[in-house]
Amino acid sequence: MNCSAKLAAASVAAFFASLAGASQCASAPLAEPSVFRSAGGVLDLMIIAETKPVTAFNFSGPNPTAGVYTVCPRPAAGTDCPAGAGTASSYGGFRLALQPGDRLKIRFVNKLPALPPEWLTRIDENPLLALDPTNLHTHGLVVAARPNSVAPPGVPVYGDFVFTSVFNPANGNPATYDPGAYNKLHAHGDVVSTGVVDYDIQLPKNHPLGAAWLHPHVHGIALNQVSAGLAGIISVGDIASYACADEACAYPVPESYVRHLIMKDFQVLGSGVGNYQQDPTFCDPQRGVGNGVCSANEESYPGGKWFFTLNGQQYPSIPVGTPEGEIWRLTNTSASVTYNMQLVNDRTGKPMAVQVLSLDGVSVSFPASATAGQVVQIGKHKLKLAKCAAPTPTTGDWSITSGLKQLYSSAPVCATELFMMPAGRAEIHVAYRDAANSMSGAPQGATATLRSTGVQTGPAGDPWPAVNFASVSFAPGKPSIVKEAVHVKNGGAASTLSVGGIFTGPVPGAKATPLPSGCAPLAPGHRRRIYFGNPNIPGGAGPGLDAKENPIFGLGYEEIDEFGKPVPNTFVDIQQFDPSMKVCVPLADYQRPASEIWELYNLSTELHNFHIHQTKFRRVDPNAPIWSPLNPNSKQPGAMEDTMALPYAEAGPGSQPATNPDAASCTVADFKAGRCKVTPVYVKIPFAQLGTFVFHCHILEHEDGGMMAAIRVVPSPK
């Protein structure tokens, strides 16, 4: 009996019990990443950053060397993982499977080799980058940014803290390699010369459920290390906690229904050496769209290839083994590449709709009464919306906005395109849909291609290439349970804001403390305004360039009062990252989370990708009516995210880009004089974790170039 016959014979009640067998019956060359699960509330691992040859690429030259994380249960002693099934050491990545309330413990070891200084664009800003220092950041986890808690000579122990640089002692002593650079680095973070640190990260018991990931975050070299392949993914909780296959929620979606797709890209020169600075013009557009690869521009990169992989595999096949479809968790772990993802029906050549369950690790939660315009405004920077099944009224959860009892607490959201900037995550339900986006059942032999259409990120932005990621096949037959949409239970984005949610209760560990000098809460009605752009510096070769013609990036700051006017003496012009300057945010009274509205202004003529550590945020409109999910006080906000695409500016007459064709950014003066049209993005950010962390553009070329700033959350004085 084939897979389709088995499913047809299965009863509705036995459907999910048969799902695992159906998956085994279908050939699935796409392998799941190696997984490490917590036990008894703890996941205790060793993670080693190192390099190894990659043999999975279809490359005619020498096997390229990539960065990998070797992961194993923490051994009793030593800094080596044992060989065997308990150790993962794959370019494709790995998954840490956590539950809310878990404790994540990592013995982290740097065994990366030193790098030729000429490979590094930012080497003049920090010569120690040639020694390849590294660290870890758990992107998307809402956890404390705790500094080292152990006195020397003990192994330092951190929370999710990026102000540290861990050096491999085999590469030399950073203090003697360049004493000046060592002292400068010490001024804004820890320098660990032993190559070993511990991370001890406690997840809150009410942590959001969904997808996060893990990557290095040393300023000036994050682009190089992520481009080399250093990344893994994290899942929090079980999908059954928020997703059901049917309207009555009798069939919670099991984990066997989920695929995890780690999207990585790797540029390889003809010599087999990796190009870790990642050139968006690497490919020759005249040579067509490749299957998981594009051929390099022979004039610039003779013999080179650019590989685009899922879980380390080049153009795998993905059989969707049941008519009910599957749930895919996609994570863009690229350092800088933006993808516009589609699932294209091979017969019609048109993209099929997918249902979007989650963005950036939090399930979407649009009220059933949300208008299409509101959904578009909230999700347009990541989704091209399509018609989706309407919720079926019945008994069940209360709809917050309508007051009527109905099953769906969140109106289903479908899209034909996912715009995924670096670090973006999306959780989607994938099933065969016809031209009307209906789950009518797949015909025999139905196939599709998972692809990116290619992206131009603005007049001064990057031309990221089109590429096919995977071939997809669909089991024939009509679905018996998931008729039109997966049910997202009441929760998701709404649960993070409700009473008892992670952003409402007292902040763990916070005790009344006098505020630091110069630190005060925003006055009622005030907002913070952040400018994104390219600074002009003395001695630079031109606007937004350093003396060696490398592009530089930065952030500016201003406080805005309740009337929309700048507060005097708060303006800081756009400048490169200065760790000594920090936005200080006190918690609310009685150690409750603080909540602020920020205005994000992108003055560049290219897209930027706002990201902030240790929290989530949501898009708002300060003028939205009270019943709108865009209202800052809405309890069903649509989506909570940790990355946000910022529209690029339109340079008008007299602006810096208009008068200097090489300029990629307007100035703040251009904006204030009306010479530059900027579309502001308003976000509401709740702060529920103490510590010093950062916000930045998650295009890592931009982050390394200075588009980052520090923030410090401190206890309330009462």
Image: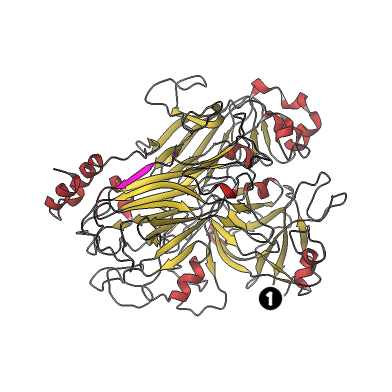
In this picture, residue 688 sits left or right of residue 206: right
Image coordinates of residue 85 in percent, x first then y, are 37, 25
Image coordinates of residue 658 in percent, x first then y, are 78, 67
Q: Quadrant of residue 303?
A: top right
Q: Is residue 231 above or below residue 131?
A: below
Q: Is residue 506 above or below residue 522?
A: above
Q: Is residue 593 above or below residue 330?
A: below
What element does badge 1 sit on?
loop
Which residue bears the numbered disc 1? 564
Image coordinates of residue 422 in percent, x first then y, are 55, 50
**Badge 1 density bin: few <14, some 14–19, many ≥20, Cα 10 Å:** few
In this picture, residue 661 sits left or right of residue 349: right
In terms of depth relative to the viewer, which is nearer, 206 or 333?
A: 333
In terms of depth relative to the viewer, which is nearer, 282 or 502?
A: 282
Location of the N terminus by quadrant is: top left
**Residue in view at x 58 percent, y 49 percent:** 286
